[in-house]
Amino acid sequence: MTTLAGELSPERTAAGEVMHLAFASDEVGIEGLAVAVLTALENTSRSVHVWIVYECIDSSAQDRLRRAWGHLKHLAGIGFIAQSSLPLDMPGWWARKRWPLLSAARFQLPELLPASARRCIYLDIDVVVGTDLGQLYDLDLEGFPVAMAINTGMSDSTREYVATLGLDPDRYCNAGVMLIDLDAWRREGAPKGLIAHGRAMRPDIWFFDQDMLNTYFKDRCMLLDGRWNYRDASVAPTGRVQHFAGSPKPWQTKASEVTSIGMHGWHRALARSGFVASPPTLYSRVRNKANVRLAQLERRIRRLVHRP
């Protein structure tokens, strides 16, 4: 049965409790991170602790991000966590050109956030938040360990692919916005379980960590209302979390050239933040390309080994 999250839990979060928001970003998407955090803080009605798992974001860029967000009254704290310090190893062959290995860092959030954090919201960096995330944070999960919104609008070929994973395409979720019961993940050892599950999946999966999350939590994911992951740039983000899934990403566009209302809104938010990104370093560009090519080669070898 399809369950849509909508009711507040009887043990709902107290108004004074800090809300935990988690992100993962490298220097390529740092402007997206600046906007996602800014708009989340602008629209919240409670204190928020922001957690960022990062790669190749140096101390100068971190300081500029703090200045971009520091004036917002609901910011309770910022924690930067280097990918190199993650407690659990992840296979390098997971990396894709479209999705860096960093994307799977969300698997380890229960290990990274303090034990006092009983739940968190994970957001991709290609979002603009136009509503109070406290409403999502307080939803009754009804015993589910995670909540995501259905990945609507899939092509016939994508739906057929999802079915090959043993999943119902009508319940396949987009992982760009997740409400996570950290305590439940800790009890079942989900961080290690997700990594082991991902290692065992066939090497030619299409959507990387999203496929891993959907198959690992099959029939155990609460389905969120679509406004929490609204993948349409043609409208304003008011009342929703607007997710710029696909390409181009907002930071790959120029404010003077975009035509959609959503993209205009993203560029206005970037201007409000005052954040100015430095160009990616040569080291990071070379490293990223090398990692992706090595991952592609290993996946190719694994496909040959696993060929029926």
Image (cartoon, grey):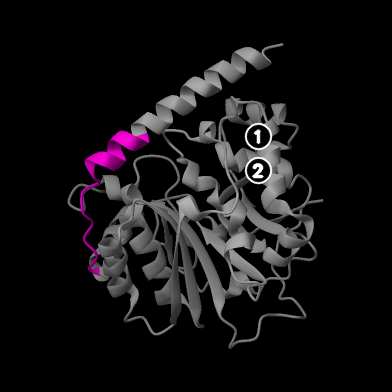
Give the side of residue 165 with respect to residue 66, left or right. Answer: right
Give the side of residue 191 with respect to residue 51, left or right. Answer: right
Residue 8 versus residue 28 in the image, above or below: below
Pointers 1 and 2 in contact (C-beta within 8 Å): yes
Check disc 2: other Cα within 10 Å, few if <14, some if 14-19, many if 20+. many
Amino acid of disc 2: Ile
Magenta residues span 274-288
* Residue 59 shows in this picture: yes
Residue 201 percent across, percent down from the top left: 68, 31
**Toward the viewer: 92 or 139?**
92
Q: Residue at x 47, y 70 (%)?
A: 50
Residue 92 percent across, percent down from the top left: 51, 35
Residue 150 versus residue 46 in the image, above or below: above
Amino acid of disc 1: Arg
Residue 175 percent across, percent down from the top left: 58, 49
Q: Secondary structure at mark 1?
A: helix
- Pointer 1: what residue? 199
**Toward the viewer: 290 or 98?**
290
Residue 89 percent across, percent down from the top left: 58, 44
Q: Residue at x 63, y 54 (%)?
A: 148
- Pointer 2: what residue? 195
Q: Residue at x 68, y 64 (%)?
A: 182
Magenta region includes residue 284: yes
